[in-house]
Amino acid sequence: MGTVTLGVSIAVPEPYGSFLQRKRAGFGDPAAHGIPTHITLLPPTEVQADALPAIERHLAGVAAASRPFPLRLQGTDTFRPLSPVVYVKVTEGAAGCTALQARVRAASGPCARELQFPYHPHVTVAHGIDEDAMDRARAELADFSATWTIAGFALYQQGADAVWRLEREYPFGPQAPSVPRQAADLSRPPAPSC
């Protein structure tokens, strides 16, 4: 059956998500249109395609055991020089994101994996572009602020065209069923990656 590349993330809602995606594209980041605005829970991970049912059951269990929590994005920072990334900071809800990603990547589950860097919830707004553009991204979004309540996360799959597409949404709570992507809905925004 081959392999697929998956990611799990919290989508940044509208109008913030499309605003930050447009800004990212405006800074010259070529990946902007293939990656919806998000907070990563599981970075791009290659898995066997036949592992998908177990992964979906695991994610449904994580979502069922989770409860909504408040999140605030405010200001910018960078991972430079360690990594060429400028991001919007998570100033409230970071502990909730950290706990959630730990459950998604639990050593006993099908999404277990080590991370290249310690987990740090954030929203990437520039990645791997020239230094002047990175500085501009950091300055232009320094006053950005958004607040909402996180009520679920989603599974995305990266296509051969490098575009991330929504596969299934996982609302929080024991009675909320996961919602698969509708086959006829090809207009869904792409999805996560760092």
Image: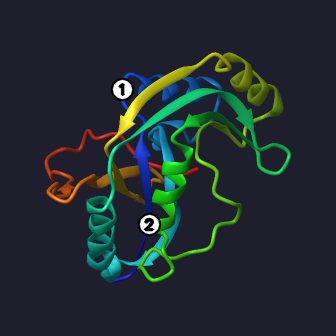
Q: Quadrant of residue 53?
A: bottom left
Instruction: Count up the numbered dots.
Output: 2
**Can you give x and y, in whole percent of width and height, for residue 111 in the image?**
45, 74
> What residue is rendered at 65% in x and 36% in y?
87
Q: Left or right: 126 with respect to 34?
A: right
Instruction: Pick whichever, 28 or 12, lies toward us.
Output: 12
The 10 Å Cα crowd at callout 2, few under 14, some 14 to 19, many 20 or more, is many
**Can you give x and y, in whole percent of width and height, for residue 83 in the image?**
77, 49
Q: Quadrant of residue 158?
A: bottom left
**Can you give x and y, in whole percent of width and height, for residue 31 in the image?**
56, 42
* SS for dot 1: loop
Spot the residue most to the right: 81
User: Can you identify the residue that label 2 sits on?
Assistant: 104
Which is in the foreground here, disc 1 or disc 2?
2
Q: Quadrant of residue 28?
A: top right
The 10 Å Cα crowd at callout 1, few under 14, some 14 to 19, many 20 or more, is few
Does label 1 or label 2 sit earlier along the sequence?
Answer: 1
User: Can you identify the residue that label 1 sits on?
Assistant: 14
- Whether residue 37 is situated above or below residue 106 in the rendered picture: above
Q: Quadrant of the N terminus?
A: bottom left
**Separation (CA) of disc 1 from disc 2:** 25 Å
- Whether residue 33 is situated above or below residue 167 in the rendered picture: above
Q: Three-letter amino acid code at disc 1?
A: Glu
Q: Three-letter amino acid code at disc 2?
A: Val
Q: Left or right: 175 with respect to 48?
A: left
**Can you give x and y, in whole percent of width and height, for residue 152 in the image?**
32, 48
* SS for dot 2: helix
- Whether residue 123 is situated above or below residue 101 in the rendered picture: above
> Residue 173, labelled with which disc?
none
